Structures are given as C-alpha cells and as structure tokens.
Image (cartoon, rainbow, N blue to C red):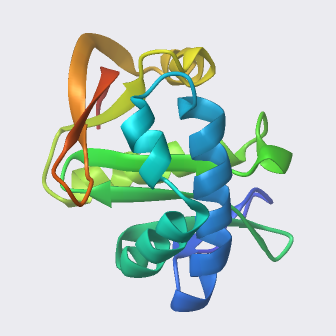
Amino acid sequence: MINEEGGPVLRRARQDDAAAVAVIWRDGWRDGHLGHVPEELVAIRTPESFAVRAAQRVGDVTVAVVDGVVAGFIMVVGDEVEQVYVGAAHRGGDVAPALLAEAARQVRANGHDRAWLAVAAGNARARRFYAREGWTDEGAFDYPAHASGGPIPVPCHRYAKPV
C-alpha cells in the first residue's frame, strides 16, 4: 500500500525484510520487557530466536517503510494484534499510529469487530501509548508466551478497541 499523505508506506513483508524485522523486534522486545517478564523467557529470547521467528512469521507481518528503511511492523492473527514494534529512531512519530490503524483494518477484514493485544504489565510507555490511541485496558491476565518447553505465563494487561 502506498501512503499518499507522506507518512510511512505500509506493505506486506517480504522474506528479505525478515532481518530488519528481527532487529526491531529484538531491540523493542528488550526495551519493553526486560525486568517485566520471567527470567526463563528472557533467557530464550536470544538474537537468534528473533531472527528465526521473524523468518518463520514473515507471512503474518506488515511493515512500515520510511525513506526505504523498515521502521516498524505489526503481526495480526485473527482478532489479536500479536506484535507492534517500531524502531527506536522512529518512535514518537507517525509510524506506530499508522501501524495500529492498519492492524485494526486487518482485524476487521478478518471478520472481527474488536481487536485486542497484550502489553507487559510493567511496560508503562506502551500502556500510555495504547491509552492515547483509544485502546481500553481490560485488566491484568497472564499471556502464554510461546516457548519450546511449553508456554511461559507473562503478567500482562489486555487492551482492546472496537474496529
């Protein structure tokens, strides 16, 4: 998709985007999760794990491109906005709101009237952002983070928004 208004260009990810997605995902995950998730999860979220998962999940990814560079991405599955990450150089601008709007559009296209996402309970910056964007904090719950030995419960808040 081309953005006629001069903001980020949103498009489906290609396999050659996986490396950039992995770096943004790894760095953003560390920014928002270290100190807020179980240490056993931190131990398995290695740089290699993000590279593998980004390559495996490229079909679920929409990227935001600014000046030819992947600036952020989302992953949407069903009614869940599984991942929302923006590179540090592009935070605070129009990339994250554009990605969230696209996530809502995808959830609607998937046949749902509400989108939801999980935010680590201690990630105050992200929680403030989602609230500013009109998402409602529906309360605390344990999100089952995928791990090879089985899910690891992560203390989160569920945010939702009508789409």
Query: In which image quadrant can residue 144 be found?
Result: top left
The front one of 107 and 74 is 74
Q: Position of residue 149 (x, y in %)?
A: 19, 55
Task: Using the rendered image of the protein, determine whether residue 98 is visible from the camera's viewpoint.
Answer: no
> Which residue is painted at 45% across and 20% down in the image?
134
The front one of 61 and 105 is 61
Left or right of residue 152, residue 104 in this image: right
Q: Position of residue 160 (x, y in %)?
A: 29, 26
> Which residue is painted at 82% across and 77% down in the image?
68
Task: Using the rendered image of the protein, determine whether residue 48 is visible from the camera's viewpoint.
Answer: yes
Query: In which image quadrant can residue 123 be found?
Result: top right
User: Which quadrant holds the N terminus?
Assistant: bottom right
Left or right of residue 39, residue 106 in this image: left
User: Which quadrant holds the C terminus?
Assistant: top left
Q: Position of residue 108 (x, y in %)?
A: 24, 51
Q: Position of residue 45 (x, y in %)?
A: 48, 53
Position of residue 65 relative to residue 96, above or below, is below
Left or right of residue 146, residue 51 in this image: right
Q: Number of numbered discs present?
A: 0
Position of residue 62 relative to residue 96, above or below, is below
The front one of 60 and 115 is 60
Query: In which image quadrant can residue 110 be found?
Result: bottom left
